[in-house]
Amino acid sequence: MTTAPPRTTATAWWRPLLLVAALLTGLFGAAAPAGAATAEATLSVTVSAVTSPGDTVLISGNTAQLGNWDPAKAVPLTTTAQTYPSWTGYIQIIQGTTAQYKFLIRSSTGAVTWESIPNRSVTDSTTTVTAINDRWNVSNGAPVAATFRVTATTAYGQNVYLVGDLAELGGWNPAKAVPLTTGSGSYPTWTAALQLPPSTPIAYKYLIKNPDGSVVWESGANRTTTTPPTGTFTATDTWRP
């Protein structure tokens, strides 16, 4: 008959150490695992950008969340018929850090056009949603007080409007065109005053809306000008029939 080998009794010298470790864990908590998530801040982004059909506006930057300047990993923004030319979206950055970014436009064929201005930057240390409002290829700065005047002879019930390639000018949408006003002492001069971004090339035209809602555009090529870096700006024009 074979007898089972005798069991050995383990020494208990390590048991007090386990007890101490358990007490310390209860007092101070377990250590955070390596690679624990870093807090992120959410930013609401809006950029005014006039685009061609099929284009998409995206935002890219120097962080992983923004694609590390890789257009293929950029964050797409969206627009609608009601909000165009404003494009909106949300991005995340590491809380308490500064991120550099730019906007880009991707055409329907995949061609990419970057803003030509210096990199933009944003710092956010809060956990609440922060809003960013930018204009395509325009550095942030105090707006310019702009005045547009055009001499236009109209029929009763007609009104003159200003429209152009900036959001402030309606993004070439007659429904969002800027109305000009006139009076018995100033007719046939029509005037509009508005705020425009500084140092910005703009293209624009005038149009007339009839009482039935139909639109008559002035003839010729788009008018072009550039707003000054500061101060005021005045454009004085004559309607081109």
Image (spheres, rainbow, N blue to C red):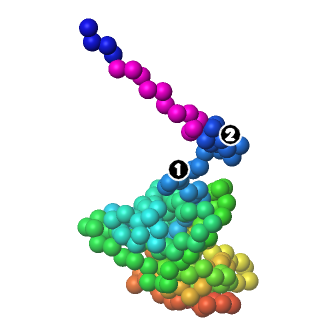
Dot 2 or dot 1: first in sequence order is 2
Which residue is tagged 1? 33
Tag 1: amino acid = Pro
Is 74 in front, or is 196?
Answer: 74
Tag 1 secondary structure = loop
Residue 222 location (% of width, % of height)? 43, 83
Q: Mark 2 and mark 1: span between their CA atoms?
A: 20 Å
Name the main secondary structure of what is drawn in magenta: loop
Kindly state the secondary structure of the residue where label 2 is placed: helix
**What residue is rendered at 49% in x and 66% in y?**
85
Q: Residue 177 occupies which quadrant of the picture?
A: bottom right
For the N terminus, which image quadrant? top left
Task: Find disc 2 in the rendering and name its residue.
Answer: 23
Q: Which residues are magenta?
A: 5-15
Q: Quadrant of residue 52?
A: bottom left
**Amino acid type at image mark 2:** Leu
Q: Position of residue 166 (x, y in %)?
A: 52, 75
